[in-house]
Amino acid sequence: MAQTTLSIRIDTDDKRRFEAFCRETGMNVSVAVNMFVKSVLREQRLPFEITTDPFYSEANMERLKKSIAQMEETGGTIHEVPYDG
């Protein structure tokens, strides 16, 4: 079986953490990526579900718009929410 090289761009910190994970599980990055590729080819799908953040769903955006309108009509108190991110 002939082999080739796959070159990808990845965040530096993500790469470091992924390499550490691979070491902790007894493999290297190449083995982990090959496992991923084989899984995709065998199952003909990604081996995980791709989802979006539900905060940005249409239903939640409508709810937020209604809440904003209600607050503007009736007055209200805006509370600051601390953000750690």
Image (cartoon, rainbow, N blue to C red):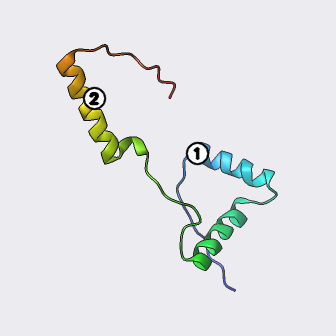
Q: Is residue 26 left or right of residue 67?
A: right
State the mark number for residue 67.
2
In the rendered structure, find residue 12 and report the number of the disc placed on it: 1
The residue that appears at 59% across and 76% down in the rendered structure is: 43
- Quadrant housing residue 12: top right
Dot 2, crowdedness within 10 Å: few (<14), some or many (≥20)? few
Quadrant housing the N terminus: bottom right
Of residue 5 and residue 58, the one placed in the foreground of this image is 58
Relative horizontal placement of residue 51, taking residue 60 as reference (left or right) = right
Distance Cα–Cα, label 1 vs label 2:
40 Å
Helix, strand or loop under label 1: helix
Q: Horizontal and vertical percent for residue 40?
A: 58, 72
Of residues 15 and 35, the one nearer the viewer is 35
- x and y percent of residue 79 in the render? 37, 15
The x and y percentages for residue 44 are 54, 77
Q: Mark 1 belongs to which amino acid?
A: Thr
SS assignment at label 2? helix
